[in-house]
Amino acid sequence: MGKQYNGIDASLRAFIVAQRVFFVATAPSGYEGHVNLSPKGLDTLRILGPRTIAYQDFVGSGIETISHLRQNGRIVLMLCSFAGPPRILRLYGRGEAVEPQDDAFPSLLARFPQATGVRAIIRVEVEIIADSCGYGVPLFRFEGHRTQLPAWADSKGEAELLDYQRNNNALSLDGLPGLRWTGEKD
């Protein structure tokens, strides 16, 4: 049933682009700490090459993904079809958080629609691409993207968003450093 792929070909690209939500999982090194799993929506995922993907990471209440990537780089993205033929696709790899002060940020950001509140672009070098049946995934109908996150970021303005990140995105739940610019040192 399941299959591994050498790269993101046209068929996989079409599947990825058609999905309205994807999930991101990371974990700190060792036995301690908390595994993190986050749903992602909006128009935030891009395929940069046959083994490279990126997504916009917006200001939020936690900083787990970025903290885990800074510590060990491990990440997996999962996409599953909630409409049409059943399928689950996992993209396992090594990721990095490209923050606004990084040289690569402007060129990566240009690949996405303009949005307020982008705190980083998560770029992933994919090591394993694997799918499975998805027979147990329920069928859902897409009604639209939620508007609360963009509206919240727009209402804050740049200065308030920066202050929010300083207060909420410097450290993970487990005390790992988050955003570099908030004052935490590598």
Image (cartoon, rainbow, N blue to C red):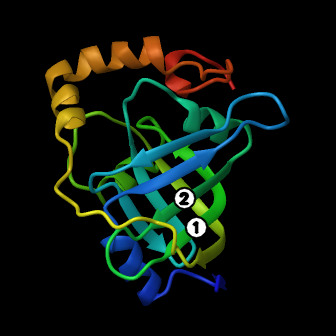
Q: Quadrant of residue 26?
A: top right
Indicate the position of residue 99 as horizontal and vertical percent values.
46, 38
Q: Quadrant of residue 68?
A: top right
Q: Is residue 63 left or right of residue 29?
A: left
> In the displayed structure, would residue 50 be above or below residue 77?
below
Residue carrying label 2? 77
> In the displayed structure, would residue 10 be above or below residue 64?
below
- Which class describes the residues within 10 Å of circle 2: few (<14), some (14-19), or many (20+)? many
CA gap between label 2 and label 1 equals 6 Å
- Judging depth in this view, the residue of 36 and 83 nearest the camera is 83
Indicate the position of residue 142 as horizontal and vertical percent values.
22, 61
Residue name at image x 69 percent, y 26 percent: 186
Amino acid marked by disc 2: Leu
Helix, strand or loop at mark 1: strand
Amino acid marked by disc 1: Arg
- Judging depth in this view, the residue of 37 and 75 nearest the camera is 37
Residue carrying label 1? 90
Q: Is residue 154 left or right of residue 77?
A: left
Indicate the position of residue 176 as horizontal and vertical percent values.
67, 23
Residue name at image x 55 percent, y 15 percent: 183
Residue name at image x 64 percent, y 23 percent: 177
Q: Earlier in the sequence, mark 2 or mark 1?
A: 2
Q: Quadrant of residue 61?
A: top left
Residue name at image x 34 percent, y 67 percent: 139
